[in-house]
Image (tube, rainbow, N blue to C red):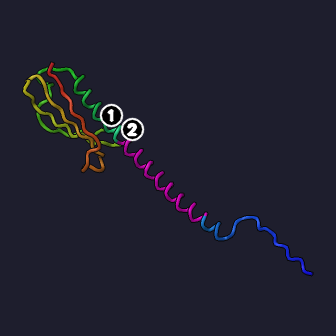
Amino acid sequence: MVNHQRHKQKGFTLLEIMIALAVFAVVSAALVRNAAVAVRQTTLLQDRATAIWVAENHLNGLRMAPRDDDNYPSPGTQRYPVTMAGRDWELVVDTQATENRAMRRVYIEVFHADDGDIAVADLTGFVGQY
């Protein structure tokens, strides 16, 4: 009599391994994409924070400057190049008169020096004559 014993196979079949690898590939691709998006968002936030600091520094410089009739900002638009955090920026400062003659409204837009189409940040403040 021939002994036909069935042995239980241990391990995974080739089909199960291929399905697991396919699932792993899809999940890995999604994780890499999410990581790339997170890095991009972090860079944008860092640029925006630096641009806001550039605008605040300029506005505070205007506020701290000594005031007299010759040094009071006159209405108009001016451009200033600025370097901060290893980057070149361009400020567009629009100074406007207000109802109060002793007060000016200052609107500051900050652009990358190499890409002046879209403002990275903007800031509005007021500067007094005295």
Residue with the most extreme right position: 1
Residue that appears at 42% across and 44% down = 42
Q: Amino acid at mark 1?
A: Trp
Segment tinted magenta in the rendering: 20-47
Q: Is residue 118 magenta?
A: no
Crowd class of label 2 (few under 14; some 14 to 19; many from 20; radius 10 Å):
few
| Predominant secondary structure, magenta span | helix
Give the residue pinned by disc 2. Answer: 85
Please provide percent x and percent y for residue 93.
19, 37
Q: Quadrant of residue 82?
A: top left
Q: x and y percent of residue 64 in the render?
A: 24, 22
Q: Nearer the viewer, residue 2 or 104?
A: 2
User: Split into 4 quadrants, where in the image is the C terminus?
Assistant: top left
Pinpoint residue 121: horizontal percent, then vertical percent. 28, 40
In this rendering, position of residue 19 left or right of residue 49: right
Q: Which residue is mark 1?
A: 53
Q: Residues within 10 Å of mark 1 (few under 14, many from 20)?
A: some
Reply yes or no: does residue 23 show up in magenta: yes
On the picture, is 110 further left or further right than 102? right
The location of residue 66, given as percent across then percent down, is 20, 20
Answer with the quarter of the image where residue 12 lies: bottom right
Residue depicted at 29% across the width and 50% down the height? 115
Give above or below for 101 relative to 116: above
Q: Is residue 47 above or below residue 53?
A: below
For discs 1 and 2, the disc positioned in front in the rendered view: 1
State if disc 2 and disc 1 touch (CB < 8 Å).
Answer: yes
